Image: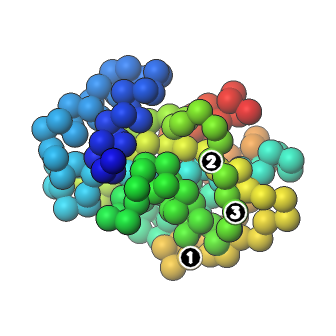
């Protein structure tokens, strides 16, 4: 199965946010290249909110270009077999943490936002950090920091707050 086919199946199976979900599906139907950064009309991206439930905290990255505290995530790459794999890859690359596990049940949320390159149609997952995880900053970040759940609203925008709330509701 191609990444495109996986994305369509994942989105069709996602039961929340029906209008936004349909926007993603319409985008992919109109743009066979709609998963790739080269698609100037926007592209599907994958992200992972790295959480440590045992310590009630979340790992956020201070994005180098956007200068905002965000979850780990980014563009799909040709080697990604699935959206979940893309989210897990991004989570591991940007957090430096090996052994992340996605929260079962598929994507937690969808979030469409404009960036410097184009519209991102982000498929958002949550990833559980293994006990004793040690993070390592990547070259895509200015900083990487753990925040208590109740601190996230003070540093991050509403999209990250909504992602955390949806993640905690699923735990």
**Does any portion of residue 51 appear in the rendered image?**
yes
Q: Residue at x 26, y 60 (%)?
A: 37
Mark 3: secondary structure: loop
Q: Is the C-beta separation of discs 3 and 1 under 8 Å?
A: no
Q: Position of residue 133 (x, y in %)?
A: 79, 66
Q: Position of residue 5 (x, y in %)?
A: 30, 42
Q: Is the C-beta separation of discs 2 and 1 under 8 Å?
A: no
Q: CA distance from mark 2 to mark 1?
A: 20 Å
Q: Which mark is residue 99?
A: 3
Q: CA distance from mark 2 to mark 3?
A: 10 Å
Q: Residue at x 17, y 36 (%)?
A: 29
Residue nearest the viewer, comparing 64 with 102? 102
Q: Is the C-beta separation of discs 2 and 3 under 8 Å?
A: no
Q: Residue at x 56, y 68 (%)?
A: 94
Q: Earlier in the sequence, mark 2 or mark 1?
A: 2
Q: Is residue 93 above or below residue 22?
A: below
Q: Is residue 112 left or right of residue 157?
A: left
Q: Which mark is residue 93?
A: none
Mark 3 Cα shell of 10 Å, populated few (<14), some (14-19), many (≥20): some
Which mark is nearer the camera, 3 or 1? 3
Looking at the image, the residue that sits furthest to the front is 1
Name the quadrant containing residue 91: bottom right
Mark 2 Cα shell of 10 Å, populated few (<14), some (14-19), many (≥20): many
Mark 1 Cα shell of 10 Å, populated few (<14), some (14-19), many (≥20): some
Looking at the image, the residue that sits furthest to the bottom is 139
Coloring scheme of the render? rainbow
Mark 2: secondary structure: strand
Q: Which residue is mark 1?
A: 138
Q: Is residue 26 left or right of residue 108?
A: left
Q: Is residue 23 above or below residue 73?
A: above
Q: Which residue is mark 2?
A: 102
């Amino acid at each position: 199965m191609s990444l495109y086919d996986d994305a369509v199946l994942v989105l069709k199976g996602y039961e929340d946010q029906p209008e936004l979900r349909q926007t993603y599906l319409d985008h992919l139907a109109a743009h066979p290249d709609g998963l790739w950064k080269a698609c100037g009309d926007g592209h599907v991206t994958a992200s992972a909110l790295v959480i440590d439930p045992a310590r009630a905290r979340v790992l956020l990255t201070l994005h180098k270009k956007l200068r905002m505290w965000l979850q780990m995530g980014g563009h799909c790459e040709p080697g990604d077999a699935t959206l979940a794999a893309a989210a897990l890859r991004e989570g591991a690359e940007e957090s430096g943490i090996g052994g992340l596990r996605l929260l079962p049940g598929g994507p937690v949320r969808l979030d469409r936002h404009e960036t410097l390159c184009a519209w991102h149609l982000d498929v958002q997952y949550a990833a559980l950090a293994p006990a004793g995880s040690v993070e390592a900053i990547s070259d895509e970040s200015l900083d990487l920091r753990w925040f208590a759940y109740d601190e996230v609203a003070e540093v991050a925008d509403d999209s990250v707050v909504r992602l955390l709330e949806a993640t905690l509701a699923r735990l």
